[in-house]
Image: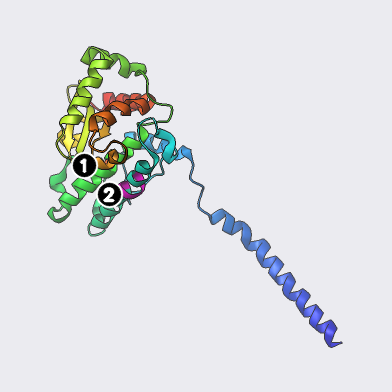
Amino acid sequence: MISILIKSFIWFIAGIVLVVVTIFQPQQLAAAPAPVSIAQGNQVQSVISQGLSANPAQLAPLPYAYNALEKAIDAETMKIHHDKHHKAYVDNLNNALKKYPQLQGRTIEAMLRDLNSIPEDIRTTVRNNGGGHLNHTMFWEIMSPTGGGLPTGNIAQEINKTFGSFENFQKQFNTAGGQRFGSGWVWLVRNPKGQLQITNTANQDSPIMDGLYPIMGNDVWEHAYYLRYQNRRADYLSNWWNVVNWNEVNKRAQASRSST
Ligand SMILES: [Fe+2]
């Protein structure tokens, strides 16, 4: 009799466990985070049209594998650059904005365009880390494993018209990148008159701080190239063209036309 009671009790407990697992497992699955996918690369579309969010700032995954850009940049550099350097800009920005939650509703672009409106105690932090987040978000998107080659679309015609030829444009761009002393960026921008021009900036400064629209830019901080190229920045600048994503550059060029 006792053994029947024990067996019944065990079956009763097993039944309860089965019911609990059946009821709660689908909810747990539904609550699980969505897998990271390449589709998140589409975020750049909203970045262009709506601005980059600071509520909070988020590090998007790379839209390709670390070793996907070996034609120009080695996997270890990509990993450290994205996972450590870019992440630090995002974290530093979010930490600074904790003290001023009202600023989190503004886009990074809006803050950089009007830095004087940022409280003085975090202004430099927002400039460096908001700029770093904005610049690197663009950087990953304008490169692709299937990139390189001649420019395509409207930007190809505009480059020829402005600089005479793609070769001239590359030469001027690379020269401007080589001339940036220390750390910074080299850019193709659209000015308020609607014209293309090449410029460079120090540190993480964005061209939008000067009223210019950044269409494409290359990172010439040593952290972007030193493992493979050491002091040979010119070689890095030259190889970088092998991974330029002209489709994305065209999207940004289109967005820049409607902004001027
Ligand atoms: Fe960088």
Q: Name the amino acid, label 1.
A: Gln
Q: Nearer the viewer, residue 231 or 24?
A: 231
| Segment colored magenta | 82-86
Q: For the residue with label 2, is its CB less than 8 Å from the closest atom of ligand 1?
A: no
Secondary structure, magenta segment, majority class: helix
Residue 41 image point, x, y percent? 42, 37
> Callout 1: helix, strand or loop?
loop
Please report the residue visible at 26 percent of the width from the left and 13 percent of the height from the top: 165
In which quadrant of the rendered image does the N terminus lie? bottom right
Per the image, is 156 magenta? no
Per the image, is 83 magenta? yes
Label 2, residues with CA under 10 Å away: few <14, some 14-19, many ≥20: many
State the separation of the CA atoms marked 2 and 1.
10 Å
Residue 100 image point, x, y percent? 22, 57
Image marks 2 and 1: residues in contact by CB distance under 8 Å = yes
Is 134 left, or right, of 42 in this rendering?
left
Q: Name the amino acid, label 2.
A: Tyr
Q: Which residue is mark 1?
A: 204
Residue 46 image point, x, y percent? 37, 37
Please report the residue visible at 41 percent of the width from the left and 41 percent of the height from the top: 62
Q: Nearer the viewer, residue 183 or 15?
A: 183
- What colouring does the structure picture have? rainbow
Q: What is the number of the mark on residue 89?
A: 2
